[in-house]
Image (tube, helix red, strand yellow):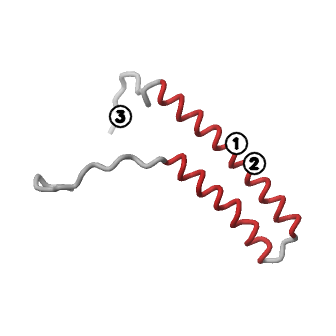
């Protein structure tokens, strides 16, 4: 809770889609390395990397499309309804 004498400025919302994609790309590199470290074949690790990269690419496309759609519609609408406590 901030008081009246607080000098904190409001922070902008983080770009969560970019954060998700960065973590997914990191996982596409880390997971195969861990698999090889624990004895999985290079072919198996490469297959896992390709699968993760494909899933990451599809998720990125869907997240960006969702972002554009939300921006065009002005964000989320509740159709006049209010949340129930």
Mark 1 packing: few (<14 Cα in 10 Å), some, or many (20+)? few
Say which element carries label 2.
Answer: helix
Say which element carries label 3.
Answer: loop
Identify the residue at image location x=83%, y=62%.
46
Q: Are marks 1 and 2 in contact (CB under 8 Å)?
A: yes
Distance between the Cα atoms at labels 1 and 2? 6 Å
Residue 2, placed above or below residue 34 = above
- Residue under label 2, please give it: 54
Say which element carries label 1.
Answer: helix
Residue 19 at x, y = what percent? 53, 53
Residue lying at the far bottom in this picture: please name it.
Answer: 38
Residue 74 at x, y = what percent? 42, 26
Looking at the rendered image, the quarter that the C terminus falls into is: top left
Identify the residue at image location x=59%, y=40%.
63
Mark earlier in primary sequence (1, 3):
1
- Residue under label 3, please give it: 83
Q: Nearer the viewer, residue 83 or 56?
A: 56
Q: Are marks 3 and 2 in contact (CB under 8 Å)?
A: no
Residue 24 at x, y = what percent? 64, 55
Q: Are marks 1 and 3 in contact (CB under 8 Å)?
A: no
Residue 10, placed above or below residue 40 = above
Distance between the Cα atoms at labels 1 and 3? 33 Å
Q: Nearer the viewer, residue 19 or 40?
A: 19
Mark 2 packing: few (<14 Cα in 10 Å), some, or many (20+)? few
Q: Is residue 76 left or right of residue 55?
A: left
């Amino acid at each position: 809770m901030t008081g009246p004498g607080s000098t904190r400025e409001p922070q902008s919302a983080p770009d969560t889609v970019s954060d998700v994609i960065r973590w997914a790309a990191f996982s596409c590199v880390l997971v195969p390395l861990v698999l090889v470290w624990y004895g999985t074949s290079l072919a198996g690790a490469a297959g896992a990397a390709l699968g993760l990269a494909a899933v990451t690419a599809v998720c990125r496309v869907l997240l960006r499309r969702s972002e554009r759609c939300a921006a065009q519609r002005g964000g989320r609408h509740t159709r006049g309804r209010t949340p129930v406590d």
